[in-house]
Amino acid sequence: MLHTTLASTSRVVLASSRRCAALHSSSILQAEASRKQASRVIKKQNIAKKDQRQHEANLHKPSPVLGTRPGDEAKWQNCDLAKVIVKESDLATSEPVAPVDLTIGRVNIPKVMNYGISGEVQEQLFGHLPYLSSAAAVESLSRHSPEMAKGKLEEGVERELQKANLFAKVVDLRNANAAGIAFENRRRIIAEFSTPENPFDPGRTEVQAALLTYKIRNLWSHLTTFKRDVGNRRGLRKLVHQRAKILKYLKHSNRDRYDALLERLALEPESVEGELVI
């Protein structure tokens, strides 16, 4: 009898506890689910805000390749590197020749010459050499026939004038190929970024950084035109990181030269410092 009563009492207590446990656990689970849902919503909103801030920062972030901020191409146009290099478009639109009166006559000398001809070399080729050549020919002829030499003097000068004009067309940079234009640009860059004490110093840090910037810009222009040229993308990344390494060395060795060089190359500090993602 006692055993039966205890058994029935335990069953009633167990059933009531199960009903209370079920009711209690359901409310806790619902509250936990609501809390997790609210956490997910807040997390999603935070992620969206973070992405928005990152997107706005990227809009104003300078390009690690070009070095300028979006919409700030005027900085590149006004820098020293852009002013010193020669572009194929400029050769097509500029005046072809500039007539110059020399000793032998008027010679149509091109405004931009190939093979590094400028200054004293230009004066020797078009000023002194034709005159000396005609004078030497007349002197040689006068030894055999003085009377004939007087008549051939004007003819010799005219022939030298024609040769000078033909030679001017040969050394015109407009007749050069891409390799000739690149050679002239490298010569100009080395001369521009070297020191007056050493006017041709290709090992100078500023010269190396300027040459790399010139190569990077040319390669970037090629890749924007030929988007399927995947092979040269790796070369572009190597050049960008090589330039960053050279500028990092200059920054640690001489901060004033580093800041001045960034302005001359139209490079923002963020485009060459830290992690570069291309």
Image (spheres, rainbow, N blue to C red):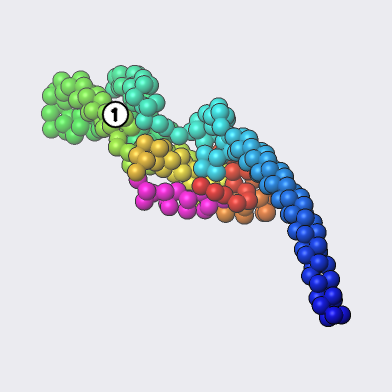
- Residue at left offset 60%, top offset 51%: 275
Residue 2 position, x and y percent, is: 87, 80
Q: Amino acid at mark 1?
A: Ala
Is 12 or 214 nearer to us in this picture?
12
In the rendered structure, the answer to whether residue 232 lies left or right of residue 33 reads left
Q: Quadrant of the N terminus?
A: bottom right
- Residue at left offset 30%, top offset 35%: 176
Give the labeled residue for mark 1: 168
Magenta span: predominant SS is helix
Whether residue 86 is visible, yes or no, is yes
- Seen in the picture, residue 244 relative to 149 is either above or below; the reply is below
Is 219 or 275 nearer to us in this picture?
275
Check disc 1 and report its element: helix, strand or loop.
helix
Is 120 or 226 nearer to us in this picture?
226
Residue 117 position, x and y percent, is: 37, 36
Whether residue 259 is visible, yes or no, is no
Q: Residue furthest front?
A: 1
- Residue at left offset 71%, top offset 50%: 33
In the rendered structure, the answer to whether residue 159 lies left or right of residue 43 reads left
Span colored in magenta: 229-244
Residue 190 position, x and y percent, is: 49, 43
